[in-house]
Image: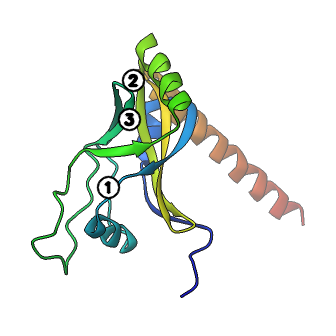
Amino acid sequence: MPREQGRKVVATNRKARHDYTIEDTYEAGLVLTGTEVKSLRQGRASLVDGYAYIDGDQAYLDAVHIPEYNQGTWTNHPPRRTRKLLLHKAQILKLHSQVREGGYTLVPLSLYFSDGKAKVELAVAKGKREYDKRHALRERQDKREAERAMRTRNNLGE
């Protein structure tokens, strides 16, 4: 059986980019059970309420919802359990110092398979205020309107 190649995205947290200012991103492996992997391969997961934290010298991912596997039996996993993240010790120390600084949090951006291994993209993020969110939304809307106007102007000139 050939090995998986490339990157297959299972879930993304689109709301995180709206609610937070992303400072830095990291790729981390996940410690999963068999039924969790099978459920992820079916493309079932939700990162909406998920967050990561550092406890001692380990990193953990919490509140990420991976539903139970349909064909699983008594071996099924709890859907919202705490999962250990696989990071280098230097990365964990760096993340811990950034989060301890204040105002920063660890947010999962996407969950995917990279060459057959489950990975999560973590972001060191700072929460946006309400007016920052409105400003970003307004900028995006203005940019879209400008592109639309340019397109119609170019189409009329032809």
Q: Nearer the viewer, mark 3 or mark 2?
A: 3
Which amino acid is tagged 1? Ser
In the picture of the structure, the residue carrying the numbered disc 1 is: 46
Q: CA distance from mark 3 to mark 2?
A: 30 Å
Q: CA distance from mark 3 to mark 1?
A: 19 Å
> Which is more N-terminal, label 1 or label 3?
1
Nearer to me, 115 or 90: 90
Q: Quadrant of residue 39?
A: bottom left
Relative to 113, does residue 124 appear above or below in the rendering? above
> Which is more N-terminal, label 2 or label 1?
1
Within 10 angstroms of label 1, few (less than 14), some, or many (20 or more) residues?
A: some
Q: Residue at x 21, y 49 (%)?
A: 81
Q: Could you tell whether 156 is left or right of 97 in the image?
A: right
Q: Could you tell whether 64 is left or right of 116 in the image?
A: left
Q: Could you tell whether 126 is left or right of 148 in the image?
A: left
In the picture of the structure, the residue carrying the numbered disc 3 is: 59
Nearer to me, 119 or 65: 119
In the picture of the structure, the residue carrying the numbered disc 2 is: 130
